[in-house]
Amino acid sequence: MDIEQLLFQSLELLGLGMGSVFIILSLLIIIINLIAKLVPQIEPAPAPAPAAISSSTNTEHIAAIQSAVHQYRRDHQAKP
């Protein structure tokens, strides 16, 4: 085989590969658009109301988090 035959064969394979990918992706887009038109859109359910949280529990959590952050900073700032 000479170089011209190899180049022609490679261009045929290139066209076949890229053409098949283009056709498959085009069909995929068409199918997705058809399904989107056929299937009715479902509205999301309304979000449930947030549960009531007692302020004492919230305050205790905030205090615990602040304590942990201060301890972490104190321990890691002391090391060079």
Image: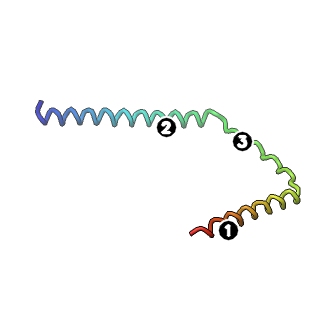
Residue for badge 1: 74
Side of 70 where 57 appears, left or right: right
9 versus 80 height, above or below:
above
Separation of marks 1 and 2 at Cα, in angstroms: 57 Å
Mark 3 against mark 1, which lies toward the viewer? 1
Question: In the image shown, does 65 or 3 lie closer to the viewer?
Answer: 65
Instruction: Return the disc, 1 or 2, that comes first in the chain's sequence.
Output: 2
Q: Residue at x 63, y 33 (%)?
A: 39
Residue for badge 3: 43
- Amino acid type of the residue tagged 3 in the rendering: Glu
Confirm or deny contact between disc 2 and disc 3 (CB under 8 A).
no
Label 3 element class: loop
Q: Quadrant of the C terminus?
A: bottom right
20 versus 47 height, above or below:
above
Q: Residue at x 86, y 56 (%)?
A: 57
Quarter holding residue 58? bottom right
Residue for badge 2: 29
Separation of marks 2 and 3 at Cα, in angstroms: 24 Å
26 versus 60 height, above or below:
above
Label 1 element class: helix
Q: Residue at x 36, y 32 (%)?
A: 20
Question: In the image shown, does 72 or 19 lie closer to the viewer?
Answer: 72
